[in-house]
Amino acid sequence: MSEKLPLVYNYDAQTRALDVEYGDGQIVRYFEIDPRLAFLSFANERRNRDFLVYLETRLREGNPVKSEVIKEADATKPIGEPQTRSVVGQQQNRHTIPTWGHKKPAGNDGAT
């Protein structure tokens, strides 16, 4: 198994096979994957973690997931830039609490 993180998941419900493309270009096909597993959901924000924990747990239990390498890792493929959020993007996602016309009560501003 590649130590790179998975980038793309392609699940075939008929064959119950999952093709996973890793960041280094390697593609691995995993067999007999239950369609109810959480990492198959696109809405799962922790799908990479859930997938890797699933593989590790099965291996630790002595029942590793059957797999085959469809495409070897591309040693010449450059490593991409890390995907980080820009400072501008972080500032745009701040939540502000609207005042909705609430006015400050008179006399509570500390002025005499």
Image (cartoon, rainbow, N blue to C red):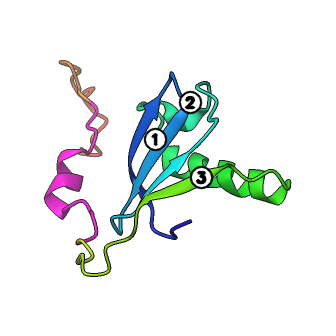
Q: Secondary structure at mark 2?
A: loop
- The disc, 3 or 1, on the residue closer to the chain's N-terminal end is 1
Residue 62 position in % (x across, y down): 85, 56
Q: Residue at x 27, y 41 (%)?
A: 109
Q: Which residue is mark 2?
A: 16
- Callout 3 touching callout 1 (CB < 8 Å): no
Considering only order in the chain, which callout, 1 or 2, is on the residue closer to the N terminus? 2
Around disc 3, counting alpha carbons within 10 Å, would you say few (fewer than 14), some (14 to 19), or many (20 or more)? some
* Picture coordinates of residue 95, whole percent (x, y): 28, 39
SS class of the residue under badge 3? strand
Q: Nearer the viewer, mark 3 or mark 1?
A: 3
The image shows residue 68, relative to residue 15, as above or below, that is below
Residue at far right of view: 61
Q: Are marks 2 and 3 in contact (CB under 8 Å)?
A: no
Name the residue tied to disc 3.
67
The segment highlighted magenta reads 81-97
Cα–Cα span, label 2 and label 3: 12 Å
Rendered location of residue 41, percent (x, y): 48, 30
Numbered circle sitting on residue 45 = 1
SS label for mark 1: loop
Around disc 1, counting alpha carbons within 10 Å, would you say few (fewer than 14), some (14 to 19), or many (20 or more)? few
Asked whether residue 46 is in view, the answer is no
Check the image and name the residue furthest to the top.
101
Quadrant where the C terminus sits is top left
Q: What separation in Å lies between label 3 and label 1 (alpha carbons)?
A: 24 Å
User: 22 or 26, which is in the foreground?
Assistant: 26
Please indicate whether residue 18 sits to the left or right of residue 95 in the image. right
- Residue type at the position of mark 3: Ser
Q: Is residue 108 left or right of residue 9?
A: left
Q: Position of residue 93 (x, y in %)?
A: 24, 44
Would you place residue 3 above or below residue 51 in this image? below
